[in-house]
Amino acid sequence: MGRFPAAVLLLVALPSLARAQGGLGSVDRRVDPARQVVVIVNEAVPDSVAVGLHYCRRRSIPEANLCRVRTTDREVLSWPEFREQVQKPVTRFLEKFPDALFLVPCWGIPSRISEENAENDDPKDEPESTVRTFVTNRDYACLDAELALLPRPARAIEGWIESDLYGRNERITAAHRLFLVSRLDGLTAGIARGLVDKAIHAETFGPAGEAYLDTRGLDKASPYGYTDEEMRLTLQVFAAYGWAIHHEDTEEEQDVSSLKNCLFYWGWYAGDWNGRQPFTFRTGAVAAHLHSCAACSIRTETRFWVGPLLSHGVTCTTGTVYEPLTAGFPRMHLIYDRLFQGYTWGEATAMGNQMLSWMAVFVGDPLYAPFAKGLRETQAANRDLATAGPRKAEMLLDSGDLDGAAAILRDIRALPAAFEEAADPAFLLRELAARRLQPASGTVDSVRTACAEGRAAALNADTKAATAAFERALKLSPLNFDANLSLGLFLLDADRAAQALPFFDKCARVDPADPALQVPWGIALGASGKFKEAIPILENAVAGGDPGGLGALGDCYLRAGDRPRAIATLKDAVARFPKDRKAWASLARAHRDSGDDAAAHAVLMEAVQIYPESVLDIAAYRTLWKDANVAAERAKLKKEREDIIWVLKDFDLPDFAPPTQGVWLEINRQADAARAEAGALVLGSIQEQALKVPGLPRLQCGNLSPSPIVLYLKGPCSRVVRFPAFAGQKGASREVGIWPGEYDVVLVVQKGGEKTTIVGTTTFHLHKEYGMTVSPGLGLEFPQR
C-alpha cells in the first residue's frame, strides 16, 4: 500500500461522523427489483447463468432483467475485450431500464481490466509523488468500477475520480448517475450462489455475533499512522449504535480464525488469509481486510483476502484488484455506519468509497439491508416462530389436531429462509402428510428417535440394526416418509429393487415430489421392469438439478429400445460420475445391443477400474469381468481375453473367497477398535511389484519380530491375519488374497503387557502383489522368497 505525502493525505479528509450518523434502523429499504436491478451473467459459463437465475428467484427479479454477455471465463480481460464484450452489450441492455440503480455481476464475469497504455505511466513532466507513480495515467481498473460509471461516459480511463457520493448520508437514486455495483462471486459458483441466501437469512432473522477491529497501534505521525487512526473511527461507529466491539491494537498479526462468533471484522495488514484452523463467519457477516491486493484474485480460498473471506462464510466484503493507495480502499467505518442506519450494502459501499474508476470491488448482495427500518420487530417474531413453532406443531400432531399443526408449519415454511439455529420442520411436514393418510400410534418424538437410531446404525454399516429401527418407526407411524425411504434404499442398495418399490410407493403417497425420493423411486421402477413409468420421474429429477439419476435414465431408455438416446445419456452419466459402476455397465450393454462389442469391451475395462467399496459390491464387480470376457470373445480380442481369463481364475481360488457380510462387519469393528487406540504410529509405505500374469492383488505378509502380531485389513474384502512371535521357524510369511480397493491397514504388536498399534491406508491395485513383513524393529520389508 503506497505511502502518502501530506498533500495526498488531504484527499482522505474524513466526512463528519456526527453529521453522517442516524439512528439504528432509521432508514427504510426502498427497492423496486423489477425496475431498479439488472443482473449480469456470462452466458459462456453455464454456472454464471445459474447463479444469476438463482438471484433473480430469491429477490423476485424478473428473468427479463438478466443481461447476458459472452466473454472470457478468466478473472481478467483487456480494455478492448471489456468495451466490446461487456460495456457495449450492457449499455444497450440498460436502455430498457431507465430506472436501473443496482448492477449485479455474477460468478464468471471478470473482475479486473488489465493495463492498456503502460508506456505513459509515471509521467516525468509532473513533480515526483506517490500519486504520479501509482495513479496518474494508470488505466488498469476494477471492471465493476467501470460499470458503475456507465451513466457518465465522457471521461478518461486513466487515474481515479473523486466520488461525489463519498461520505454522504442520503438515499441514492438514478438521478445521481452512478450505478451501485456489487457482485456475486467467490472460489466457486456455489459460494457465489449462497451470498443471497445468507443475506436473506440475516434479513429474516437478524444478524447476530461479535465485532472485531484489528489495528496496529501506530502513532498518527508515522507513515501509516493516519490509516490506523482512521480505522479506529470504527470504534465510535459501533459505540454509537450500542454494539460492543473487540479491539486488538498492536503490531501483532491477529489470526482471524481465532475470532469467536464473528459477525463483523475490519483489520489490516497481512498479505494473505492467515487463518490457521477451521473457521466460519456468522451468517450475515460483513468483513474486510485492508491490503493492496485484497482482491487480486477472488477465486481462491487461501491467497489474498476477499476470496478466503467468502470461502469462510462472509456475506459481504470488499477489496482492491490492483494497488489502490490507501485513499482507494473503501472506508469500512463509513460502510458499517450506513448499514446500521438501514441502507443497503450497495448504497453503503457507494458512500464509503472515495475513488471511482479505480480498484475497489464489492462482493455480496447489493440489496442486503439487515438493519433497515422496521425489520427488528419482524426479525424477533420470525426467530420465535422458527424456534418455538416446531415444538408447538409437534404437540398438536400428538394430540391429533392436524389442522392446527398444519397452520403453524405453513407459517414456518412461508418464511423467506430456514433458521439455521432451529430444527428443520421438514420431518414434521412429512409426518403431518403421513398422518393425514393413516393414523399413527406413536408420538412424533418416538418415531423421530427410531429413525435417528436407524440412521446411526446405517452409518456403522449395521444394516440389521438399522432395518429393525426403521421397522419399529413404521409400527408407530406406518406411512412415515423417512423410515419407508430408508428401508427402500437398503433394499435397492442390495439389488432388491422389486422389494424396495413398495416402500418408495408409500413415500410417493406422502410426497411424490420430494427430491430425495425421485431418483431411487425411478431406479426401483426401472429395475422392476416399469421403465416407462420410471422415465418421466427420472427426467424430472435430472431437469430439477439432480444428475444422480442419469445412469438409471439411460438404462430405462435402453430398455425402452431408444439406444441412441440411451448411449448419449449414459455417456453423460459416466462423465459426471466416473465411479458409477452401474452406469458403465448399462453403457456397455447399450453398445453390445447396438452390435459394437469392441466398444462394450472398452467400456467394461473402464468399469473394472472402479474398485469395490464393500463386500456387497464384489458380486457386481465379478459380473463386470465376466461380461468383459464375453465382449472380448465376441469382438475377437484374443490378447485382451487371455488377460481377463487370468483374473477370472482368481475368482474361484479359496484364498480370494470374500467373507460373509457378518464376518466382514465384525472384522471392520475390530479394526476400528484397534485403530482408535491412543498413540498409534503411522504405517510406512507397503512395497509393491507387478504380478507375472494379470490377476487380483496379493499381499505377502509375515512377522520377523519377537512379538505376536495381528494384522487387520479393513476394506471391500476385509481380512484378519494373526502371526505368532518369530522364533526362527519356517512359514513366517504367507500370501493373503484380496480384492482391489482401498483398505485401512492396522497392525497390533503385543509385547508383554504393552501394545503398539501401527495404522495407515493403502489402495491395493489389480495385477500387483504387495509385501509387508514386520522386521524386529517394526519396519516393513518385502518378504524374502
Image (tube, rainbow, N blue to C red):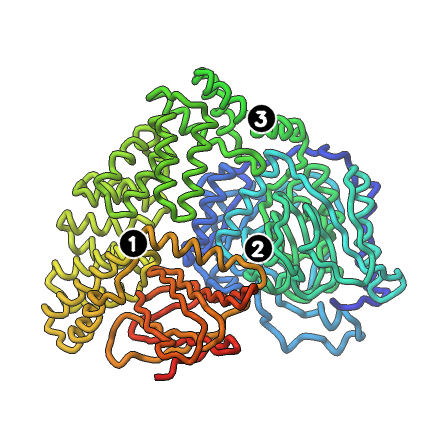
Real-space Cα separation, disc 2 to disc 1, in angstroms: 44 Å
Instruction: Determine whether 409 is above or below 658 in the image.
Output: above
Q: Secondary structure at mark 1?
A: loop
Residue 24: percent from left, percent from top? 74, 35
Q: Nearer the viewer, mark 3 or mark 1?
A: 1
Q: Secondary structure at mark 2?
A: helix
- Residue identifier under label 2: 311
Q: Earlier in the sequence, mark 2 or mark 1?
A: 2
Sort mark 1 into few (<14), some (14-19) or many (20+) by Cα contacts within 10 Å: few
Residue 198: percent from left, percent from top? 57, 43
Tell me whether circle 2 and circle 1 mark residues in contact (CB < 8 Å): no
Instruction: Determine whether 228 is above or below 476 in the image.
Output: below
Quarter placement of the N terminus? bottom right
Task: Tell me where residue 489 sits by quadrant.
Answer: top left
Tell me whether circle 3 and circle 2 mark residues in contact (CB < 8 Å): no
Please give the label number shown on residue 388.
3
Residue occupying the point 65% across, 46% down: 285
